[in-house]
Amino acid sequence: VAKTVAEERSSESESRKALSLYMSILHNCRGQVDLYLPMMNDIALAKLGQQVSAEIPLTRIAIYQVIGSALYYNPQLELAELEKRGVTQQVFSQWIKDSEHMDRWLPRKLTVLGLTSILQLPASSFP
């Protein structure tokens, strides 16, 4: 996944398919991949940084699906990872802006699952 997403030669379609593997891992290996979440964030957020100016947000939406899945997987750990990188506000702001381009049900569903998972956290654990 890391190689496909990071390589310049890979098409955006290939990157989106590779990112969907992270999504599957996060949903199917609940509680078992905490150690890999930082690496997944490194790869997804690096790709998000490359996609900021992309006119068509399809790859950004795939990245938001991974972030939403990570929030659903472990909201406290994912928020800590985003905060550690200092990108929490930028990610959520861009995510909300791009949400109007989410035409399919899966990105919408994962947005809702991820954001509502945050609401389950005690207020004292927010960054």
Image: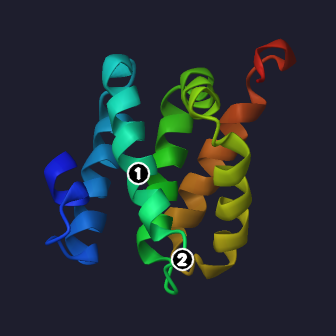
Q: Are dots 2 and 1 in contact, CB under 8 Å? A: no
Q: Relative to residue 50, is residue 121 drawn left or right?
A: right
The residue nearer to you, when weighing 44 against 16, is: 44
What amino acid type should be assigned to the residue bearing mark 2? Ser
Q: Quadrant of residue 72?
A: top right
Residue 75 image position (x, y, % from top left): 60, 28
| Place of residue 80 in the rendered image (x, y in percent of width and height, measured from the top left) | 61, 23
Which scheme is used to colour this image of the protein? rainbow
Name the one closer to the observer, 103 or 43: 43
Measured as percent of width and height from the top left, residue 104 is found at 51, 76
Q: Is residue 92 above or below residue 74?
A: below
- Hey, which residue is sitting farthest right in the picture? 123
Figure quadrant of the C terminus: top right
The circle drawn on residue 46 is 1
Q: The residue under label 1 is which amino acid type?
A: Ala
- Residues under labels 2 and 1: Cα distance? 13 Å
Residue 68 visible? The answer is: yes
Q: Secondary structure at mark 1?
A: helix
Neighbour tally class for label 2: few under 14, some 14-19, many 20 plus, Cα within 10 Å: few
State the residue lying farthest toward the bottom.
55
Residue 71 sits above or below residue 95 on the image: above
Residue 1 is at least partly visible in this image: no
Q: Which residue is mark 2?
A: 53
- Label 2 or label 1, whichever comes before in sequence order: 1
Label 2: element kind:
loop
